[in-house]
Amino acid sequence: MDFPYLSTIVFLPVIGAIVIALLPGANPRRIKLAAAAFTAVSFFLSLALFSMFDRSLDGPQFVEQLSWIPAINVQYFMGVDGLSLPLVLLTTFIGFVAVLVSWNINLRVREYFAWLLVLETGILGVFCSLDLILFFIFWEVELIPMYMLISIWGTGRKEYSAIKFVLYTLFGSAFMLVGILLLYFQAGTFDMIALAGMGLDSILSSMMAAAIFFLIIIAYAIKLPIFPFHTWLPDAHTDAPTAVSVVLAGVLLKMGGYGMIRVAVGIFPETAHSYAPLFVVVAVIGVIYGAAMTLRQTDLKKLIAYSSVSHMGFVLLGIFALSQVSMTGAVLQMVSHGIITGLLFAMVGLVYSKTHERSIPRLGGLVRQMPVIAVVFSIAGLAALGLPGTSGFAAEVITFLGSFGSTMVPGIHIYTILAITGVVLGAGYILWMLRRVFYGPPRDEYNGVPDADKLEKVYIFAFVAVIMLIGLYPRILTDIIKVGIQTITGGL
Amino acid sequence: MIFAIILLPLFSFLVISFVLRPFFNNRPQLSAYTTICAIVGSLILSIWALIAVNGAENHVLTSTSYQWLAIGDTVINIGITMDSLAAIMVVTVSTISLLVQIYSIGYMKGDGGFARYFAFMSLFTASMLGLVLADNLLFLFLFWEGVGLCSYLLIGFWFHKPEAARAAMKAFVVTRLGDFGFLVAIIFLYVKTGTFDIGELHELALAGVLGGSTLTLAAIGIFSGAVGKSGQFPLHTWLPDAMEGPTPVSALIHAATMVTAGVYLVARMFPMIASSETAITVVAIIGGFTAIFAATMGLVATDIKRVLAYSTISQLGYMMLGLGAVGIGYASGHLDGHHALTLGVAVAIFHLFTHAFFKSLLFLGSGSTSHATGTFDMRKMGGLRKVQPWTYVTFVIGSLSLAGIWPLAGFWSKEGILHEAHAYTPVLFWLAMITVFMTAFYMFRAVFLTFHGEYRGGKEGSHSHGLHESPKIIIIPLVILAIFAVIAGWLPVGDFLGADVHFSFFGALTSWLAWASLSFGIAGILLAYIIYVRKLLSAKSIGQSLGPVYTLLIRKYFFDELYERFFVMRFLVDGIFAVFQWIDTYIVDGSVNGIATITVAGGKVMRRLETGQLQVYGLAIFIGILAIIAFLFIFS
Amino acid sequence: MAVGLEHFLILSAVLFAIGLYGVLAKRNAVVILMSIEIMLTAVNITMVAFSRYSHVISGQVFVIFIMVVAAAEAAVGLALIIAIYRSRKTVDAEKFDLMKW
């Protein structure tokens, strides 16, 4: 067996967490440096993985397979394919940046960074596991650090939001566990690759297949989130500390989309096909509804949280249009949204940390006081509204192109056109927000407010660079994603 | 080589943003010189391309294309192509842009955002050049939005002014509304035909493979993008407000880089759009209607830049009308194939070409007057003829050209459009003739109010002292543009575009049409002279006698109120979206919280059973065991 | 009269019932602990008796285990009671409602 890259990438953060927890001396700076070091190594390893990945093969690569609980045929089965690798890369990137974003934390520093690193391991594990039980365990592992991070380091109604997040997610997970067990008793394995290859749609009765499909997908629907399961998201985002918002928007939501493609659609393509109209309609509702809600928000973080709901609607549309192009677009949209919205939340955090104000009506004219933040915020905003040359445009246009051309769902043309109106609304809410926060006459109360410092500039410009890179040359990701999607759409 | 036309200004943008602005901010002049050098480079290359295209086979220079995306069968290439249409456009754009940049050195002197200004201007020029050269719709759309972005940045250049921020946002959002249709059309066309390539689309449309409702819908979708960009009715509202940006930006937007993009798009897609009779009729009607509609609002505007803005909308309407009229002739079979297709493009682009010169001249001239008076309000100007002779003369030349007076540039290009409109769309032709009258009237109203009479600005009793002619760096571009505003109509643009246009300097005066339009124009000028110079008729009393109409015009037909206050704010944000929010809070989230509340309430009731005493629990366990045993005994 | 299996079982049942009564009804924590011991003894008697009559030795092995555990449990239990007594000055089981929500 080769060097276990995946296990190293996945478990490095948690090892970091242990080291931090046991690190002698309570020097916060050392703790932060250690956290940065562990996440950075994980990030560079996944970059290496990205370059070593063989783009001509479908199926998982860098596989690690060990028997774990032989009695029920549970394995320690890790591997990445074209679908999960970009998400792994995204997670390690956001994980590393999240540490930098948290540089100014000074409340219970040791615990904070330990939890942050555990969180990263949980998310990475979800993307790398190819065994449903392992997948489920990682899926649940991520909840605990999230709860701690929101309820201890958050603001506002933090306990409420933390509990809401955990209970809502657990609610979904309970159904997913039942679904997974049902699947096991029907098919006799937890191996995702084997399950996907079985053609369970035709083996099982259609009732049973639909039952398992819906039991499983409910967890992902909550996580993504899709309308009407989205209300935990604005609350969690609003009250979470900045770095956690970045991780939450950046990668946590993508677990939902990933699960949908890998588990729900991957194992039950035919069932997904028969229920696709339902999901496409929900996706369109989500797009328009989320965009409409943003126009009513006065809290900067809530506004961006609702824009996530809108953008995740595009992902759902792409997935359930069920064509190779549309699903590739959906995955690209997940990555692109992760970076764009991660940046947006980081920028909101910066604005908030400098002005101690998040209410849009009480902000204004900030471009004079914080030009760099204003410029980067604007770039992030323009990317979010899908300006060509940014990743947002590439992802959206591929999704729309694929969805519009899909032959799997009747009436998809109308739904796609309706979803595209979300882009117009997107321009409205983003520019309106920028205008109210940054433009107009400068306000005296913010005179002397500092602009971004060196470290902050480093990470925000890293985000910008990635946004532009994907926007100008999307093939860097699509060439890999399409390989992963091919195996899934192949079942249709 | 052709790529360099785009890349030079783009490079200038990058250099200014990443090198000059951060490290040489104490010498902002450098950024202006960088921009100008880049655009001079583009201009030279453009002229080279123009000559090369003229000599090339089929008048097309092809260039390599690159694969941007490949998923399964979906392959998207990006590439550029240089044909005669593109060549004319790049030359126009880079010429106007160059002159505007030179003017800007004087106009923007001492502004805090000097470097930023030139960075944006470079990017703006680069985007427009890219838009012109793109050989497929998706790539074109990329630059299309880039142009929109730059106009957003430049209109909102003085971001501390709330009106500027508002106008910038309005420009972007309103044009995006049109772009929505454009994007849908692009995707729709791709799904139906499997290509983004403009040339292939034309072939498919001409061969009849692409036809019927598919073609009509796609063509209207593309046109809706043009409506947004070119400020055509009903998406015209952003353009007058776009005056909030610096004046050279307005000149650039109106003459070369933004609003002309819409006309260019329709011209570029003309063979396809003209293949659908419905679509091309829509183009003609929208164009003809916008021409007169915008002109009426220009009659009463008091801000000199707004007058010019309305005239731009109106003139763009002419160009659309030109395309539409020839297209109708083609679609109804009066004109035969190839000739018609080149004729439509030639007529519209010729007007676009001449318009670019005199309109940028007028805008820069208005900037020059404002340089002296510090205002754009014509009610506070007057008498500037004496202090600003150069500005006055050039401005009058521009106005005459715009009014279509022989033998200035505007006459020739407008004549071409009127001729085609007369042939194929008689109703719209008469609307256009009335517009000729209105145009001449409002332009000379502006001239007389600004340059004649007594100075009305400044403090009580103060006179025109302190007013001065603008510096040379401002005057020189005006003079160059004025020369073009005279001679641009004599250039063989139409022939270059492949249409047989017989140019005859005096021969043009033999047709009744020319005399008709000339007399309409001169009548407009005379009326303005009577009212504003001789004051034989009082503008005020005319306004009062036409009370409601006057209010309607000055309030811009209430479109701003209708769109912004009523539709967006009242209907959407405070209407439907407020209902959504109510649903979100009380129904969607309410049910989540409701479930939680019910659970908690249930727990409060149930917890009374828990006394906390182990012995009670033990008893319960014992009774439970007994019950189970009894159950097993009974049922086993 | 020969002593049969049922005699042992009756004895153990009686002892178990006495112990159960003590656990559920007595208020003194020490008495409750003693009653638990009685119940364990009752179980032990059953185990030994079955072991003897069915010739399976494992029952007796379990009894040894139980006795060991019971001894440990008694020690821990008494320690807990003493700890509670120290903090609450009582060993009355009805006063111990720490588990109440």
Image (cartoon, coloured by chain):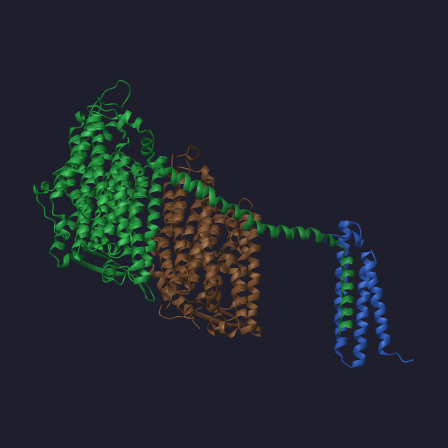
Q: Which residue is drawn at the image coordinates 82% and 63% (left, top)? A: C20
Compared with residue B260, is residue A1 higher up or lower down, i.e. above or below?
Answer: below
Q: Position of residue A348 (x, y in %)?
A: 44, 45
Say whether residue A324 is left or right of residue B30: right
Q: Position of residue A136 (x, y in %)?
A: 53, 64
Q: Quadrant of residue A486?
A: bottom left
Task: In the displayed orientation, state which residue is furthest to the front.
Answer: B426
Q: Position of residue A210 (x, y in %)?
A: 52, 67
- The hue of chain A in the figure is brown
Compared with residue A4, is residue B55 higher up or lower down, i.e. above or below?
Answer: above
- The hue of chain C in the figure is blue
Task: In the displayed orientation, state which residue is furthest to the right.
Answer: C1
Q: Who is closer to the viewer here, A140 or C59?
A: A140
Task: In the displayed orientation, state which residue is furthest to the bottom.
Answer: C55
Q: Quadrant of residue B211?
A: bottom left
Instruction: Name the image quarter holding the C terminus of chain B.
Output: bottom right
Q: Who is closer to the viewer here, C24 or A272?
A: A272
Q: Which residue is drawn at the image coordinates 37% and 46% (left, top)? A: A376
Q: Which residue is drawn at the image coordinates 75% and 64% (left, top)? A: C72
Q: Position of residue C99 (x, y in %)?
A: 72, 54
Q: Which chain is green?
A: B
Say whether residue A227 is left or right of residue A403: right
